[in-house]
Amino acid sequence: MLTNLERIINDIETLSQFNSTPGKGLTRFSLTKADRGARDYLKGELKKIGLKVYEDPAGSIVGRREGTDKEAPVVMIGSHFDSVKNGGNFDGPAGVVMALEIMRVLEENNVKTKHPVEFIAMIEEEGGRFGSGVFGSRAMAGRVSYEDLLNNKDADGITMAEAFEEFGFNPEEIEKAKRDPEKLKAFIELHIEQGPVLEKEGKDVGLVSFIVGINQIRVKVKGRPDHAGTTPMDMRKDALSSASEVIAQIKDFAVKAGSGTVATVGTLNIKPGAANIVPEEALFSVDIRSKKLDCIKEVRAKIDSALSEIKRKYGVEYYVEDMLMVEPVELSKEILDIFKEVSEDKGLAYKEMISGAGHDAMIMAGLTDVGLVFVPSKDGRSHCPEEWTDYEDLQKGIELIYHTVLKVGDKK
Ligand SMILES: [Zn+2]
């Protein structure tokens, strides 16, 4: 292999030390002391390689290596360097270390590419501090305004604008983080799978073709509170027993929609919530995800008609509130084909996958061609201190992207 396992291990272990909760997993919120430590380390390593290093107005780190054609659009590689609270060492950093190691190998081997290549370490992907996720990539897409920075606050009431200023950035320049799609050739991300499939199936890498769309709704079914002993069964408006009829069908709706569609009722609250009162209200959430927008709409329509059915049968009322709607994203077929070709060439066992979680790649797909590679997560664990990827597995993913960069960047 061209990449160096020792360096990869050292990068991950060094980054894991920039942590505000040692002993309780990794917590690295944006624009904190831990962020500063990781930021300085990454910038230092990029400078050692001899790259042009800077931070964009949103605080994401960029290390640029020119191509033989300076005007050619750039191939960006990377991921995010913030974490959730009490998370692990790999969600984000795995992809940042991928980009760092690839930059080193390009330089060591004096590789010439037509297209410039940029290392990217995105800020605030998790939204852990300011509740504003995929921030770095949204800023690149021109989807963040100065007003957003004034409105986004952390738990202590510090606005993102104040935090930016304290860190030496000018928040009023945030909109300059926008990248011109004409000047982008591709964005390639590596991320841990955060699920158990690759490990279970003994695959080296997951090649992502779609990132799912998500529709989250909150449903309220309203009946009438009555005495649980004296009200006959046929004279009740029981919110919970009515809602249950809908909830029980949701699994089926998802299965029938096909294309890997999933639907989850993750919360359920009953009011007033006493053993001897017929429930007046049942509140529940539904999270519907699919690679096909039509499938999401189909499940949603069936839920609506099941609700109108219980209204007709039992005389209950219902209200549906949309909490989140994100359309599915299809990633670049061209890059996916290159991933497959390189995997076959290098003897890597791959699996084409759908990502059930959003990543910076999802936002970048609105700007340029995007490729996303997953590496295995031990026991599928993530967003917890136990999060782990074997370094050898991480290295395989990095090698795959290295050879892909040579093709996409047009090696001379
Ligand atoms: Zn992540």
Image (cartoon, rainbow, N blue to C red):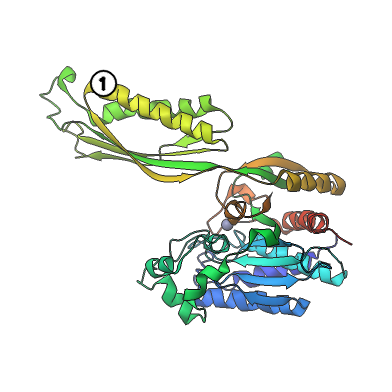
Please, what secondary structure does the residue beneath circle 1 have? helix
The answer to whether one can see residue 204 in this image is no
- In the depicted structure, whether residue 306 falls above or below residue 286: above
Mark 1: amino acid: Arg
Check the image and report above or below for 98 versus 285: below
Task: Using a 10 Å C-alpha cutoff, classify the residue at mark 1 as few (fewer than 14 neighbours), some (14 to 19) or many (20 or more).
Answer: few
Q: Which residue lies furthest to the left in this view?
A: 230
The N terminus - image quarter? bottom right
294 sits to left or right of 101: left
Q: Nearer the viewer, residue 143 or 32?
A: 143
Indicate the quadrant of ligand 1 in the picture.
bottom right
Pointer 1 residue Cβ closer than 8 Å to ligand 1: no
Callout count: 1
The C terminus - image quarter: bottom right
Above or below, 31 relative to 307: below
Determine the image quadrant of residue 94: bottom right
Is there any visible trace of residue 116 in the rendered image? Answer: yes
The one nearer the camera, 388 or 219, is: 219
Side of 182 relative to 133 (left or right): right
Q: Nearest the camera: 360 or 394?
A: 360
| Residue hosting label 1 | 312
| Whole-percent x, y for residue 62 in the image | 66, 71
